[in-house]
Amino acid sequence: MKKISAGLLMYRIKNEKPEIFLVHPGGPFYKNKDEGCWSIPKGETEDHETDMLDTAKREFEEETGFKPVGTFVPLGSAESKSGKTAHAWAFEGDCDPAKLTSNMISIDWPPKSGQKLEIPEVDRGDFFTPEIAKKKVVSYMVPLIESFERFISS
């Protein structure tokens, strides 16, 4: 079955320019990686969830510790090379990235060792201009940022 995820692109206007909040994945694999691995806070839908916006809100709060509130503007969807589809919504908000608190997940580490390691799903977050955000995110998310740029300039 095809994997579907949903996420939120939080933005703020600073010095009359938009900034996008992105998160960096936790764990030893991503420890020294930067460009091309950040993301909007997002996650897979659970079996009982029928509203993807609700999934996006839940995932945002789980991964950041911040409760998303406001008007949510659909940005469409993007598909990864593996076939996973991510749906996204933009909302205006602000936070102190230093106060981010993420849920914990269990991974096999080292890979395929059978040993489990508990890590934060997200180890940090920050605000970036759309230009920098497009360099930071996993490549399949660039169209979502471009959709946001069209929305914010209209």
Image (tube, helix red, strand yellow):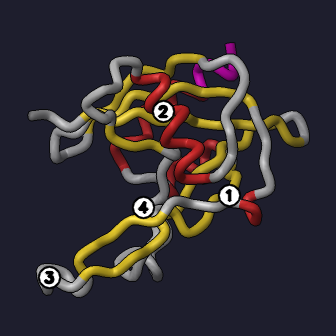
Sequence-first disc among 4 and 2: 4
- The residue at which mark 4 appears reads as 37
- The residue at which mark 2 appears reads as 56
Q: CA distance from mark 4 to mark 3?
A: 25 Å
- Taking the spot 58% from the left edge, 51% from the top edge, the residue there is 22
Location of residue 68 with respect to 132 vertically, above or below: above
Most foreground residue, 39 or 48: 48
Outermost residue, front side: 48
- The residue at which mark 3 appears reads as 114
Q: Identify the disc placed on residue 126.
A: 1
Q: Position of residue 79 (x, y in %)?
A: 27, 35
Q: CA distance from mark 4 to mark 1?
A: 13 Å
Query: CB under 8 Å between callouts 2 and 3?
Result: no
Location of residue 92 with respect to 134 vertically, above or below: above
Most foreground residue, 4 or 133: 4
The disc labelled 3 sits on which kind of residue? Answer: Gly
Element at label 3: loop
Q: CA distance from mark 4 to mark 2?
A: 19 Å
- Taking the spot 39% from the left edge, 28% from the top edge, the residue there is 87
Quadrant, the C terminus: top right
**For the residues carrying marks 1 and 2, which lies nearer the camera in this image?**
2
Location of residue 25 with respect to 23 vertically, above or below: below
